[in-house]
Amino acid sequence: MTALVTGGTRGIGLAIVEELVGFGARVHTCCRNENELNGCLRKWDHLGFGVTGSVCDVSIRAQREKLMRTVSNLFDGKLNILINNVGTNIRKPMVDFTAAEFSTLMVTNFESVFHISQLSYPLLKASGVGSIVFISSVSGFVSLKSMSVQGATKGAINQLTKTLACEWAKDNIRSNAVAPWYIRTSMVEQILSNKEYLEEVYSRTPLRRLGDPKEVSSLVAFLCLPASSYITGQIICVDGGMSGETKRGDIMVQAGSICRDDRWSHLGVTALVTGGTKGIGHAVVEELARLGANVHTCSRNEAQLNACLHDWEMKGFQVTGSVCDVMSQGQRVKLMDTVSSVFSRRLNILTLNDKQFLEAVNSRTPLGRPGEPMEVSSLVAFLCLPASSYITGQIICVDGGLTVNGFFAKL
């Protein structure tokens, strides 16, 4: 794998460089400070890491173009991984920003990543398997004190992440963003030296601590691995749970949490799931039954159906079944007669697990294919590892970009 990590000599960027090298990647990075860059390159060379570097101020267009020419030459015109990490901040009330300060943040935080992504596109496409990860911030989701412009740039990055996931999926390029909260880096040392402010940060963070750069770099690396090949268009917070809760007076609302009250129960509900003995249909039957629904399903294969019915009975699920080929009108009519009789002429849920439906879903999925079970299980396994120890309260879609694809017209 070949990778470009902008701003890779300190903090989160440094951790990302070393994480990717640990997975065998050849990495190029950049920094405005030549002495700082050379110091890192000497250290990496001593450690045997395959890292090269360029002096580059990404806020300057000509230097961005020179950087990408260097990367293209180093990696023979191919780039697998682009990490848009560089960012800065100016903390002050919105009304106090000068035009120059506004421009500095917009150019450094957004224009630079937009342009570098443009320049990287032909290299990512040429690699055959490309992945972009933007380093965003929770400020792109929620209002943070004195961070109006920085938050606006990160919100723009989040939308760009989704747009590229859809626009570049045809070229097998995935696009995701990682949005940290307070991470122990030099950028936040000064503000967090205020003990009162630090305690306020802790009070808003369910894990009651700051994050470590390695807790960000581990997720970034995962999003660049084949194990995450069906994840695109996602903005994932690495924030100790901060973005997963919103205080409203004395009420704490957990975003994405599931309270198993009556609103989240299918007790007394009836459901018909066609083709429920394997694959997605099987998963739907079990999910509905687990929530208390009475489910009827069908299959052309009697032996397969009977085996599933036996398994569901052992699990205590309320599932019945019929042998039915839904391609036959006569058998469809017979199926519905059975369902009507079983459920006393009342049906709450109908799930049609058919080829046309799956084709329609695939046509709306930027990656143009269904996912594999292992593409889900790999994320589940990652979220159970110590490497994900600052990720909590997140709902991550493994959907090939479906949920961020808002316009389905064929152009």
Image (tube, helix red, strand yellow):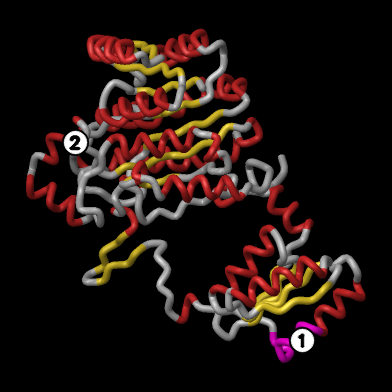
Q: Position of residue 249 (x, y in %)?
A: 22, 70
Circle 2 residue: 188
Q: Position of residue 313 (x, y in %)?
A: 64, 77
- Eyeballing the image, is 374 above or below 264? above
Identified by mark 1, the residue type is Ser
Q: What is the quadrant of residue 281 in the picture?
A: bottom right
Residue placed at 21% from the left, 37% from the top?
Answer: 184
Circle 1 residue: 340
Q: Position of residue 330 (x, y in %)?
A: 92, 75
Quadrant position of the C terminus in the picture: top right
Residue 3's disc is none
Residue placed at 53% from the left, 42% from the top?
Answer: 232
Identified by mark 2, the residue type is Val
Is 327 in the magenta?
no
Stretch in magenta = 338-346
User: Distance between the Cα atoms at labels 1 and 2?
Assistant: 64 Å
- Eyeballing the image, is 174 above or below 59? below
Decide if residue 112 is in sight here.
Answer: no
- Eyeballing the image, is 361 above or below 248? above
User: Most extreme residue toward the bottom, as rendered?
Assistant: 344
Decide if residue 327 is in sight here.
Answer: yes
Residue closer to the observer: 161 or 317:
317
Give SS at disc 1.
Answer: helix
Residue placed at 85% from the left, 74% from the top?
Answer: 332
